Each structure stands twice: as structure tokens, then as C-alpha cells.
Image (cartoon, rainbow, N blue to C red):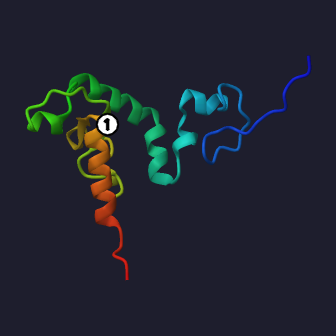
Amino acid sequence: MPMAPPRACSTRGCPRYAAYRGKCIECARGHAHARATGPEQRFYGTTAWRALAARVRREDVLCAECLREGVHTFATQVDHVIPVVDAPALALVRENLVSLCTSCHSRKTMTEQNRNREPMR
């Protein structure tokens, strides 16, 4: 039986061919090249960041923002209190990290991006 022709990886911007469920092997594993869009984003694929983020998630199991509201939600993300682009020296400082749920992390990220956006003229 003839083999199907290779297809491009379904991850946006990935130049590789799909090998597993529409993604290349690297994207299927979730490697940083699939998410990296700039120098500050490549940081999140480093071994140092992944180890520290795992430690923070183990130490702080609940979302810090939800806890302020009296709600107990499991944290799924680790966020920089002061963003990496504003203070690269604090990128791997434990005191600058907080565990958040996906909803709170998305809300915080959007607020930061909107704050840094230039006003329309």
C-alpha cells in the first residue's frame, strides 16, 4: 500500500513535516521552538525555567489571585510578577514568581499587553 505524502506540521510557523497527529515530533512534545517568537520567549524553553516553574507549581498549588477572592482554584501557570521584558534580571528569582490558574494568567497577560500597547492616533 502506498504511503501518503508528508504534510506540513500544523503548528503555526513550524517548518517541519508532521509525524504525529498533524504535528512534527518536536511540536507534539511541546518543545520551545513551537512557541518561541522572540528572544524573550525562548527563555521559557530553557531547562532552568522549566525546573523553577515546576518547583513553584509544587510549592504553590492554588492560584494566588483566586485565593485573594476566597476561591480555591488549582494553579496551572507560573507568572512573573514583574514581566521578563521589564526586568530580565528577575526572570529566575523565586520571589518574582506566582502560581496562577489559566484564567487569571490570561487576564493578567492581556492587561499587561494592553498597557504596553501604543495608543492609536
Above or below, comparing residue 11 to residue 88 in the picture: above
Callout 1 crowding tier (Cα within 10 Å): few <14, some 14–19, many ≥20: some
Q: How many marks?
A: 1
- In the rendering, at what x and y percent does residue 71 appear? 12, 30
Tell me what residue is drawn at x 34 percent, y 53 percent: 88
Quarter occupied by residue 101: top left
Helix, strand or loop under label 1: helix
Q: Residue furthest top?
A: 1
Above or below, comparing residue 40 to residue 118 in the picture: above
Quarter occupied by residue 64: top left
Above or below, comparing residue 99 to residue 121 in the picture: above
Which of 19/56 is in front? Answer: 19
The answer to whether any part of residue 86 appears in the image is: no
- In the rendering, at what x and y percent does residue 73 appear? 20, 28
Which of 56/92 is in front? Answer: 56
Quarter occupied by residue 87: bottom left
Tell me what residue is drawn at x 53 percent, y 31 percent: 30
Residue for badge 1: 102
The answer to whether any part of residue 71 appears in the image is: yes
Q: Quadrant of the C terminus?
A: bottom left
Q: Residue furthest bottom?
A: 121
- In the rendering, at what x and y percent does residue 78 appear? 30, 36
Q: Is residue 25 left or right of residue 110?
A: right
- In the rendering, at what x and y percent does residue 3 appear? 87, 23
Q: Quadrant of the N terminus?
A: top right
Tell me what residue is drawn at x 8 percent, y 32 percent: 70
- The amino acid beneath tag 1 is Thr
Tell me what residue is drawn at x 39 percent, y 36 percent: 49
